[in-house]
Amino acid sequence: MTGSVSKVLASAALVMGMSGPALAVVELEWWDFLAGGDGVRMKALIDRFNEEHPEINITATTSEWGLPFYTKVRTSVAVGQGPDIMTYHLSRLPIALEEGVLSPITDEDLETAGLSRDDFIASAIEAAQDDDGQLMAVPFDVHAIVAYYNRTALEGTDWLDADGNLTGLDSIEDLTEMLTWAKENGFSDPLSFQTEGGGGTWRMFYTLLRQQDGELITDGEVLAGDNLDKAVRAIQILTDWRSEGLIPEQAAYPASVALFQSGRAVLHINGVWEVPTFNDATEADTLGFEWFANEVPQLLDRPATWADSHALAIPNDANMSAEEREAAMTAIGWMQRNSLAWADAGHIPAYSATVESAEYQELQPNATYASLADNAEFDPRSTIAGVASPIYDSINNLVAPAVHGFLEPQDAAEQMKQELQALLD
């Protein structure tokens, strides 16, 4: 894809026997990393867009999530062979800025899409800007971890209020008490999450760090000042839960989900993207209990929840025509106004009008945990942070082993500080 003209498929000639000129169809190449339920829903959205916009045709390609996708984007954009529109994690925005792979989104672009910055959840639109306030992508959702729980098991306890929501979990001690109760009442792994690998452990660690108002990176310094102590505390909390048998030993991602589905965990902390999994299990009558999900409770000094955002972005392509850019922004605007279908995947739409709509308020548990958008904590703004970044490697190689007793929390935090600082220096 080097020439813009080659992708505008209509000629100016009249079609014989028809009452008007041939329709000029702008071809847009779309790249994403969306698999599973996300992929199904995005494909359906693209198909609907194409049906409603005969003048624009989106052809979509899905690549492997994580580093393979972003490596493909970097190399293809560098040689002018990138797509016209793509999905992008906002946690990787600093890396994108260093690589120069994104085309800034101007106010004129937003006007073409029928959008403005005020249309979006504040935390998402902030994460989509560079340090000078230039918008680099258009946020499509906020996806975060939530607390899934077994309502049936907690019925009649002090941890469930009259509306069936979690209550009384205002400290680490409160949650430990609930998990201990669950252990004593037959739940072999009371709190399940991905304890093997960097993803799940990172989300838990970062949530606990930010709930202490801790910062991983401050002015280019990793775990500066008392942030090191806060990191140690976050690791120690997880380590204590593991040593008491309250979280599973090295559970891979699928296993962590299965522990909750099988009734072995009373609580499951994972991304909002698992809502369809549990909805499907309920509809198939294979779950055996009633479940729900709330925002992760505030256990420490302040409310905070790890979060990221899928955004829609335009690659930095000097050969992109004005017609293609207009078509891309038209697609981005349409996707926002139709993001209720995306919310069905568990994500919180970044487009505020969708979240405020009556239709969204009927989506449960989505509408209940949508409050977490106000407490969303995105990854540190750094080239070593974000999806498939060195931070994930450090968590996998140091923090996860410490949680499982192979390294002291203090040593893990100090080594993480040293390794990550070397990358920044």
Image (cartoon, helix red, strand yellow):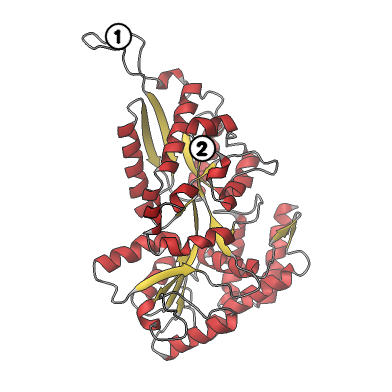
- When the figure is inspected, residue 110 is found, relative to residue 387, above or below; the finding is above
Give the alpha-carbon distance from disc 2 to disc 1, as whole Å: 35 Å
Q: Amino acid at mark 1?
A: Leu
List the residue tagged with mark 1: 14
Q: Nearer the viewer, mark 2 or mark 1?
A: 2
Marks counted in the figure total 2
Measured as percent of width and height from the top left, residue 402 is found at 60, 75
The earlier-in-sequence mark between 2 and 1 is 1
Q: Is residue 245 visible?
A: no
> Which residue is painted at 52% across and 69% down in the image?
296
- When the figure is inspected, residue 299 is found, relative to residue 86, above or below; the finding is below
Residue in front for this viewpoint, 142 or 274: 142
> Which residue is painted at 36% across and 72% down in the image?
291
SS label for mark 1: loop
Measured as percent of width and height from the top left, residue 418 is found at 73, 63
Measured as percent of width and height from the top left, residue 305 is found at 56, 64
- When the figure is inspected, residue 245 is found, relative to residue 58, above or below; the finding is below
Q: Classify the position of the N terminus by image quarter.
A: top left
| Residue at the left extreme, as displayed | 17
Which dot marks residue 115? Answer: 2
| Residue at the right extreme, as displayed | 225
Apparent side of residue 38 relative to residue 270 in the rendered image (left or right): left
Q: Amino acid at mark 2?
A: Leu
SS label for mark 2: loop
> Which residue is painted at 73% across and 56% down in the image?
422
